[in-house]
Amino acid sequence: MKNFLIALLAIVCFTACQSDKKQETKEPVVDSDKLTLFVGTYTRKEGHVDGQGEGIYVYEMDKKTGALSYVSTSESVVSPSYLAVHPNKKTVFAVNEFDGGEDSYASITEMAYDEQSRELTYMTQSSTLGQYPCHVSIDNTGKFVMAANYVGGSVILYPINEDGLITESSSYRKHEGKTEHPRQEAPHAHMIVQHPTKGWVFAVDLGADKIYEYKLDTLSRTLDFVEEYPSTNSMSGPRHMAFHPEKEVVYVLNELNGTVETLKLTDESRFKESLQVISTMAEGDDRDPASGAIKVHPSGRFLYASNRGEVNNIAVFSISSDGTLTAVGRQSTFGNAPRDFEIDPSGTFVLAANQNTNTVVTFRINQQTGMLEETGIQSQIPTPVCLKFLGD
């Protein structure tokens, strides 16, 4: 009997150990010294770009050096240019930036990300009811996705169902307006985003020269128009905006005249009180700025804005106590057309995506001045457009 009990106990222990091992193998292997980075690309030739990418690329960034190492490439999808990573870290949304033609539209694609295999796989796709969508974002609840169509000048809302999949659009809003500028012959929505704490939804329209405010009604699943705000500086071409993490201000990047405008953003006043307009260009530089992206440092102390065209640099600003900016300097991106750049979650590095020269360049941020310091690290990635980290 004693031998039987010993044998039985041994079997139970062995089974428990094997069970623990099985559970351990299901847990994703996460390197605490690495950050996952997704890179959106153009995959085919269009009027403004010779796309050479193959989909969304997955890379790892070394937290100590900023160096990138290739991990995988998503399933083939047409020009997944701009990306949004869901807070659950399991899904990535991409607008497919192309012209669907007279009888069709462009699309938005949802990909599943597996942290264990570190691969992206196709989940579903939906029409954007417009052409050349160029921006996508996720609302604060994580239950809706919003996208902006450049051609057609419209914004669109998609609910996320209980299975985590985007459905057909539930709300569509068409913009109106134009100016005498050749780039503003019609509305061109370039961004739609929700304020992280207030819940306001803003759409930036380069062609209409306006910013639109919407209310996201989560019950009716609609974008309800609130107000439109014409640019205080006519024909400036608002492209993107960035919120300060603490101050009641917003920074609007104007593509056509290469400026950053600081505006009050309060319950009482939104986009009506301009505090400052400052150039992204050096004094006396009259080249076309073709400004691209704008980001605020996680500390709230610095702001960065990229210029493309003949300029190809990132302008660096310090942020004062009242939210206004002071020019600190400019850093070449060592490539052509830095359409986007990203600051890593720790605020240590800036990664610049040079669309036309197929490189992502790593810079270290000087934490005292905000200036970008060369690291000598360049990664070859075909036609990079958008950079997004998988949390921190």
Image (cartoon, rainbow, N blue to C red):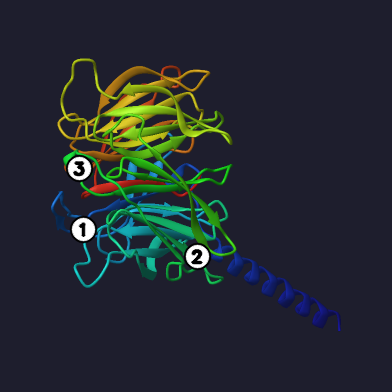
Residue under the image location 25 percent in, 63 percent down: 78
Q: Mark 3 points at which residue?
A: 183
Residue under the image location 28 percent in, 64 percent down: 106
Sequence-first tag of 2 and 3: 2
Left or right side of 12 for 209: left
Sequence-first tag of 2 and 1: 1
Sequence-first tag of 3 and 1: 1
Say which of 67 and 305 sits in front. Answer: 305
Q: Which-is-in-front pick, marks 3 and 1?
A: 3
Residue 276 visible in rendering: yes
Which secondary structure lies at badge 2?
A: strand
5 is higher (above) or lower (below) than 124: below
Which secondary structure lies at badge 3?
A: helix
Q: In which quarter of the image is the N terminus?
A: bottom right
Amino acid, disc 2? Pro
Amino acid, disc 1? Thr
Q: Name the residue under label 1.
A: 43
Residue under the image location 17 percent in, 55 percent down: 52
Where is residue 258 shown, x and y percent of the image? Answer: 26, 29
234 is higher (above) or lower (below) than 339: above
Quadrant hosting residue 304: top left
Q: Which-is-in-front pick, marks 2 and 3?
A: 3
Q: Name the residue under label 2.
A: 159
Where is residue 339 shown, x and y percent of the image? Answer: 26, 41
Residue 341 visible in rendering: no
The span from disc 3 to disc 1 (Cα, nearest Å) is 24 Å
Q: Neighbour class for label 3 at 10 Å: few (<14), some, many (≥20)?
A: some
